[in-house]
Image (spheres, rainbow, N blue to C red):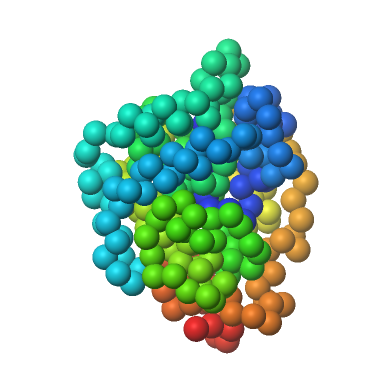
Amino acid sequence: MITIIGRGHSGTRAISHTLTASGVFMGAQLNDSGDMLPPEDLYEACRVMAKYVTYKGGLEWDFSQLNSMPIDPEFTRLVESYLSSVLHSRSAQKGWKLPETTLIYPWIVRMFPDIRYIHWVRDPRDCILGAHLTDDLSDFGVPYEKTDDVRLRRAISWKYQREIVKATPPPQHTIVVRFEDFVFRQDETQARLEAFLGFPLGRVIMRPETVGRWKKDTGCHYFDFFQEDMLELGYELAPAMNSH
């Protein structure tokens, strides 16, 4: 079984469509983005787990108890309900994609320690340009310092999802893939994925203009708290950026 971990607007539809084109069962009902529907049970699971996240102020959260406390039974029920079509599928390869899965990554890893996790990342400057359901973390029960600045809300959401992944002990089978590499080095990147997954992948058309959109953006697209993660992920900092 396979799942894709990545914030909304990270380009996760590319890998979801690739897996579907490769014969992987990605759920009984999908939307144009390759998300498995209906999502409501997983959204509610996000709210259940968020009750156990401790907010420390600013951009700091304590996720530590999520790695050791008993998983809330209601969470398990909701996740199993959402994944029903996948869990009951007899397909040799199966999985799901829904960006909100990233919000519950610690408990997903504990429920499914042996599955394949594809961590999909994208330059945050591109990632925060468009609206996504997870822009306001409080909609999923996550505590944070609310702001009327839309771009800042998206940036905080990006940072939170980066932090929750980093705070989770990595599962046995995991791979990190940058969206930009999938666009510009598709053959090489798919070869990495094929070695990781153990089966051949089909090809989907990727558009180079989806990378670096922030360069034409006139709004704020960079925040100082991006810097450490950007460097860690191999993204170069531009000499001049619209930033806070």
Compared to 204, does 178 lie above or below? below
| Residue nearer the viewer, 230 or 150 | 150
Is residue 104 shown above or below 197? Answer: below
Q: Quick check: 94 left or right of 32?
A: left
What residue is shown at x 41% (from left), y 53% (from top)? 141
In percent of the image, x 46 and y 47: which residue is there?
A: 102
In the displayed structure, 158 sits above or below 194; it is below
Image spot of residue 118 (x, y percent): 51, 41
Q: Which residue ends up furthest to the bottom in the rendered image?
A: 240
Residue 82, percent from left and from top: 53, 30
Residue 17 percent across, percent down from the top left: 69, 38
Whether residue 3 is visible here, answered yes or no, is no
Residue 209 lies in quadrant: bottom right
Q: Which quadrant of the figure has residue 200?
A: top right
Q: In which image quadrant can residue 163 be found?
A: bottom left
67 horizontally vs 159: left or right: left
The answer to whether residue 216 is left or right of residue 57 is right
Q: Residue at x 57, y 41 (%)?
A: 98
Residue at 50%, 38% in the rendered image: 42
Residue 212 percent coordinates (x, y)? 67, 69
